Image: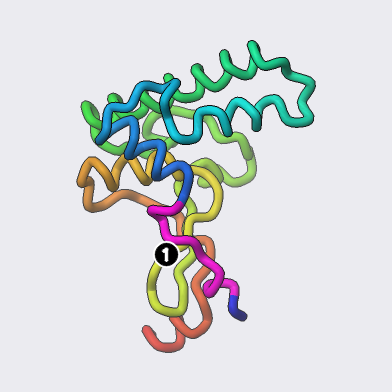
Amino acid sequence: GNWDKKINEIKNKVQYRVIDELLNKSIPIQLLTDYEFTINKFMGGNGIDREKAIELTNKKYQNILKLIETIKQKGFKTQEKLGNSSHNKFNTWYDEIRISITRDGDYILNGSGNHRLFIAQQLGIKRIPVVVIRKHYLYVVNNV
């Protein structure tokens, strides 16, 4: 199929922009491009008031800052190596960075790990473990 033709460039993803702003541009949390968007996302349909949404938004970005520091100091580690239990007891790889490989051999992110991947990229870490969940048929037949 053509599932791999409808991909966004990684640099257009919100998570990439957030990591760039926090890590490379040292922008304060409250001035992040997506700060208000995140507040509104927490409020939307959840019955959460603005004050609580601001608290959750700040906590989310503080956790990302901690993640940046941890990866800077200790390198990239899988969730398993960090001792984090999976949210999916049947698939322990579920919380790892999951990708699909396109017909051209590029990758598409699928699910968890976007922030971790973008932190690793922007810190210049060249190799990290990922779980490949699918490969495009044309990639497989052309690279056997």
Tell me the residue at 72%/15% (across/down): 49
Say which residue appears at 79% left-offset and 21% top-offset: 47
Question: Please, which colouring scheme is shown?
Answer: rainbow
Question: Residue 108 appears at what percent x and percent y?
Answer: 47, 61
Q: Which residue is mark 1?
A: 107
Question: Furthest-bottom residue in view?
Answer: 142
Q: How many residues crowd around disc 1 within 10 Å: few (fewer than 14), some, or many (20 or more)?
A: some
Q: Is residue 51 left or right of residue 132?
A: right
Q: Main secondary structure of the magenta part?
A: helix
Left or right of 14? Residue 120 is: left
Measured along the vertical axis of the image, is residue 25 above or below residue 53?
A: below
Q: Identify residue type, mark 1.
A: Tyr
Q: Is residue 4 magenta?
A: yes
Q: Taking 50 as reference, is 73 left or right?
A: left
Residue at horizontal 45 percent and vertical 87 percent from the top: 141
The x and y percentages for residue 112 are 52, 44
What's drawn in magenta, residue-wise? 3-12
